[in-house]
Image: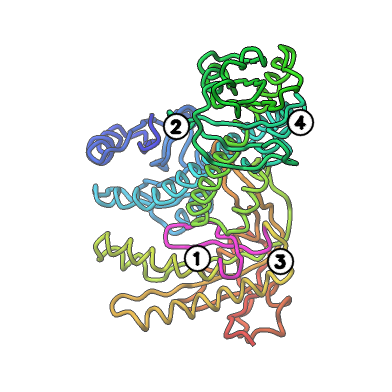
Amino acid sequence: MNDNEVRVLVVDDGRDNREFIVDYVLKPNGYTALVARDGLEGMDMVRKYHPDVILLDLQMPRMNGMQVLDALNDEGWSIPVILMTFHGSEEIAIEVYRKGVRDYVKKPYTVDEMLDALDRCLSEVRLRREKDALTERLLQANRTLNRRVQELNTLYQIGKSVTALVSMEQLLVRVVDAATQVIGAEQGSLLLLDGNQLVCRAVKQRGDASAQPTNEVSSDQIAWHAIQSGKAVVFSPEELRKHRAQNPMLPTAVAAVPLMIGERVMGVISVANLQVDAVPFTQQDGAMLSALGDYAAIAIENARNYAALRETTQQESRSIRSAFERYVAPSVVDRVLENPDALQLGGRRREISVLFADMRAYTAFSEHAPPEDVVSLLNEYFKIATDVIFGREGTLDKFLGDAVMAFFNAPEDQPDHPYRAIDAAVALQIAVAERNTSVAGEGLAFGIGVHLGEVVVGNIGTARAMNYTAIGDTVNVAKRLQERAMPGQILISSEVYNRISDQVEIEEIGEITVKGRQKPILVYNLLALA
């Protein structure tokens, strides 16, 4: 199965319903259909195929829908579930949503109704896939970088006698200085191949204290001879005497070695003596120069690779940062890029402030508006929310349909995280109101809930699919507060109010009962920041 296909598991003991979904809903719309006749078979299919969405019947033999939901939760599966049943009571709806159901379709249903439910669920699946793909790219980039850095470090150790400098220009100068010192030559040069030309990049003239950088095309025939032979060449004064008769400026002794990586020649190191009574170079001098040439070739290749790798890594980091920062706060990206171990699975307990914001009247709007308008409006409001959250250095956990979850005080410590969360909530309502005032047409509002407490925060999931997220009762309470909030309203818990009581104006709502909690929660309506 490729990464782009969507696998939908249909778990229903009714053959007619299974065939209707497969033949009229899934196959015509490009979904990959998986079928199970009861809950036990359905769980086997989940473990084997890892579907993207589950269409689940409630009443089934052997294992019913409720038991399947419990099994999914017990085994840690986070697959979106759409429940299909003839029973549509509020009690059942509340119970299944508590167990993790994303949507609810009553039988009999139409093809369009089922497709709409699938599309709503798949928005979360697509987002998760994008985040997983980005995470995998980031992991691969760090693995490649670590491997290459290790290789470069090895090369550096081999050539450290002449490669203490990173700058290519300074490196070439250092190599020429080392060559003249090792051989005891009066002058030397380093020439690199550039296409069909030989370019002198560093030279030390007789009497100079050290070599100097240069960039001149050379026609040195001895250097070309070393390149063509692939071996060190040493010319004695006797071998050069007949040439000096025609040109007294020629050296009295010359040694040249090719710079090679494997079978590839990249240039030449050449040394020379000019004085008539200078000591001639020996074959041992040629061997020593060859050893230095091996170090120099590795060092030059090292410097080139390092420069290219640095540029590639910077470009890839910019690309990954640009894409990844759409989903998490910049501080998370910095932490991951600087520390690959931060991508390991696991979390730690810490206190955070959680903000949930959900669009009101979105469902009604999406039912009547064209899909293009729905997506455009959704993106516009999500951009407003993202700008507000990132502006206060919050972590954008996820988009849930038309809702946004964010938290503060992780991964970086933020001692004022309750205020940051409240400030973000107020700023979000103001920004949405300003947008609705300035733009003609449909306008929506957010209902917001804010709560604080301890959670486990970190990379949750599997080695192949993980999210940087927060898990715990604190998250659930914040979501429940958001569900109670009216359009444009911000509901905060007493835990939040007690931390910032001198910084806000509130209206006490009273105690409310939250699903899953025995004790009621004291809730306040946030009116303004003081």
The crowd level at tag 3 (other Cα within 10 Å; few <14, some 14-19, many 20+) is some
Question: How far apart are the two marked residues, 4 and 1, measured between alpha carbons?
Answer: 52 Å
> Would you identify the image quadrant in which residue 222 lies?
top right
Q: Observer-nearest residue: 358 or 486?
A: 358
* Residue 50 to residue 88: above or below: above
For marks 1 and 2, give the CA distance.
Answer: 38 Å
Disc 2 designates what residue? Answer: 42
Q: Which mark lies nearer to you, 2 or 3?
A: 3
Q: Earlier in the sequence, mark 2 or mark 3?
A: 2
Amino acid type, residue under disc 4 in the picture: Ser
Tell me: 155 left or right of 98. Answer: right
Q: What span is in magenta?
A: 390-410
Mark 4 or mark 3, which is nearer the start of the sequence? Answer: 4
**Amino acid bearing label 2:** Gly
* First in residue order: circle 1 vs circle 3: 1
> Which quadrant of the figure contains the C terminus?
bottom right
Q: In this rendering, would 274 be left or right of 4?
A: right
- Whether residue 111 appears in magenta in the rendering, the answer is no
Residue at the spot 25% in from the left edge and 41% down from the top edge: 29
- Residue 460 higher or lower than 239, as above or below: below
153 and 345: which is toward the camera = 153
At horizontal 71% and vertical 72% (from top left) the residue drawn is 416
Of labels 4 and 1, earlier in sequence is: 4
- Residue bearing mark 1: 386
Q: At label 1, which amino acid type do we have?
A: Thr
Quick one: label 1 or label 2, which is nearer the N terminus? 2
- Determine the CA span between mark 4 and mark 2: 66 Å
Name the residue that disc number 4 marks.
161
Please rate how many residues cluster around mark 2, counting C-alpha atoms within 10 Å: few if below 14, some from 14 to 19, many from 20: many
Above or below, 41 against 446 in this view is above
Residue ID for mark 3: 414
